[in-house]
Amino acid sequence: MRASPPAGILMVAAVGGGATMVIELAAVRLLAPWFGSSLAVWTNVICVVLLALALGYLAGGRLATRGRPLAWMGKLLFGAGLLAAVLPLLAPLICNWLMPRAVALQEAATLIGWGSLAAALTLFLPPAALLGCVSPLAVQAAVEVSGASPGRAGGWVLGAGTFGSLVGSFATSHWLVPELGLAATFWLAALTLFLCSGGAWSLGRGSRSGLGVGALLAIGVVGTSSWQGPVKRPELSEGWRELGAVESPYQSVRVVQAPDGMRFLQVNEVTDSFQSAWQAEPGLLPEGYYYNYFALPAWWQELEGSWRTVVLGLGAGTAWRVLDGALPPESAHVSLGIELDPAVVRLSERHLGLSPSDERRVLGGVDARVGLGLLADASLEQVLLDAYANQVEIPPHLCSVEFFRAVNRKLVSGGWLSVNVGSFGREDPVLEALVDTICAAFETSVLAVRVPASRNWMVYARRDRDVPPLAQLAERTRDTELARLVGPLELESARFRRSVPEGRILTDDRNGIEVLQREAIRLAGRDRHDREHR
Amino acid sequence: MLGCLAATWGAAIPGAQASADALSRGLFVEALEETEWETNPLRQARQRADVFYAARDFEAVLETCRAGLELESGEDPWLLWRSAGSALWLRDGELAAAFASRLGGAAADDPDPARAEFWSAQAAAFQEQAEGHLAAAQDRDAAVNRARTAVAGWALVLVAGAVLWRRV
């Protein structure tokens, strides 16, 4: 009696596990250009893969009782490889069918939930279910071939499968998708599955013919993949064009140009949202762009010497371009921009005029909170927070009271925090919670202003001092281009000030921003319904 | 044309002119305060709607116009015009179409041919834009239905699979 199952069977189990993880992780990236990669999409994909594995285990266990488990493994791995190979071609067709173009962000919530679930079921359930069948068959084969006890054989197969999953996970996130792209990742998975399919056949028959067939199929996949090119992205509206695109380790990134010449950085976006905007001349952007409101603090107070800022969530550097053209003429602006995704920086340098220098340093590949921690205390006049993930989600660790206390420490006395908050209105629970949290962290009054003609609010707070009255800002910006920004803010309906927290304070331990974001979308839908039926 | 309309509707009275002047100088609070002098509630609603529209506070425009439109039995084209424009900014096709339709009706009732023609053209333009939003909303709803049908289809397949599983 052999002590352990044959290495070939364990290899096939490991490849099955690895391919499952490749499909699962790359699945979200495949759907992201249409549905984003929010928690809802991740949840749907993970649930579908788990469902598929459960079904696969049941089916595989049943097939194992019918004899010739290695032959079954060969067939199922072949089927899974075939399905994995066509995923990059099928996904754009299915996703375009499920997601119309240019949906407004606030209208897309239902569609994202149902659409991503339907797409995940259609695209990923079949191959993942076939791969799920492999483990029980491998256990049966191991028992038959080596004569090991079912428990021992099961332990070996599960161990090999899980180890394969581990390798598949790391490889997908850190190498396959960023280096090879999505389509090639799926085709590489298919190629490996075909080879394993051939291997399983060969093990079952004791000949090498299966391996030869698998190798031929693998060569076919490689040929097809080089002919097909990358995965098709969502179509752009008429008159828009794509200037550049890249699959980064974090997301799908692209730069698009509107018919009027404005350029936008989009990250996993098919809705009307964007992460950065660019126009040819630096300075204030047209009406409705919240970036303009980052320029106000420097005018609000008497400027003394240099204006040192850090931009958390630099993107393509839109805030820099706005500040460059809109800060008081006597200011010497020195800034550090922190951007998590280095691919965003590279693409922005090519297409969106981002040009780092001694005065404009970029810290790429670093999380905003980690990067902020590297800076000296009391060294900044302004912190600009514009960090979003998955289109609309503020990362929980960038909106907690602990984080805002850290921001407070980095500011000079009287220094400013300015935060862009996507909000559906004055009563938006995300806005309320952020204002309360900043208020608790800074222990000074916080001012929130509605950015006209947008779905954004800008929240201002100062270290050791209250935000001065708007009249002071109006006085200082009179006869400047910024007057057009300040005037509407003076209306009471456009702002509110808070000196003491009135509601929930977000902490690292108990944040719940995702729940608040879902609640905000629900309330926005209700308000719209009320408006239409009043 | 809008200036003429404002004048013919009595917007040229001192308070209204002062409000419009303040607005043109970007003094929104002052413009709103000047509307307090207006004793005619309908005219006041128009002036306030103008201030909020210029401030791009479209929810406030709709609220003001709604209150103004409830003041009298007839339709006020100015308030309907502001309402339809605000609804379009908010991408609410259904609401914009409703206001555009009412604006078209009010235009037909206007005894002044020049004004009637202007409002009618505005109503048509708003209607067209509203239909664009409505078509997008229909696309969206259809996509949601497709997705739900696909999920239901998969659920049926799984249930049928389970039944067959027990029989085989």
Image (tube, coloured by chain):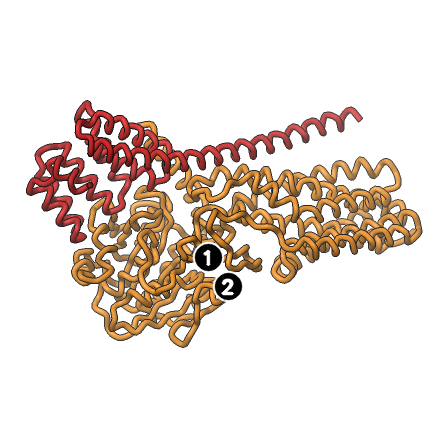
Chain colours: A orange, B red
Which picture quadrant has residue A440?
A: bottom left
Can you identify the residue that label 2 sits on?
Answer: A347
| Front residue of A163 and A39 | A39
Q: Is residue B166 left or right of residue A200?
A: left
In primary-sequence order, the first of circles 2 and 1 is 1
Q: Is residue B63 left or right of residue A338?
A: left
Indicate whether A61 appears above or below A388.
Answer: above
Disc 2 marks which amino acid?
Leu
In the displayed orientation, state which residue is furthest to the top: B73
How packed mark 1 is, by other alpha carbons closer than 10 Å (few <14, some 14-19, many 20 or more), is many
On residue A308, which mark appears? none
3D distance between C-alphas at marks 2 and 1 = 9 Å
| Front residue of A9 and A406 | A9
In the displayed orientation, state which residue is furthest to the left: B14
* Subunit that carries the residue with mark 2: A
Q: Is residue B51 left or right of residue A311?
A: left
Asked if the residues shown at circle 2 and circle 1 are in contact, with their CB atoms under 8 angstroms apart, the answer is yes
Position of the C terminus of chain A, as image quadrant, is: top left
Image location (x, y in percent) of residue A52: 68, 40
Can you identify the residue that label 1 sits on?
Answer: A265
| Front residue of A248 and A265 | A265
Which picture quadrant has residue A105?
A: top left
* Subunit that carries the residue with mark 1: A
User: Which residue appears at 34% of the width and 48% of the height?
Assistant: A454
Residue B162 visible here: yes
Image location (x, y in percent) of residue A482: 24, 59
User: Which residue appears at 39% of the width and 50% of the height?
Assistant: A506
Question: Which element type, helix, strand or loop, lies under badge 2?
Answer: helix
Image location (x, y in percent) of residue A212: 87, 54
Image location (x, y in percent) of residue B145: 53, 31
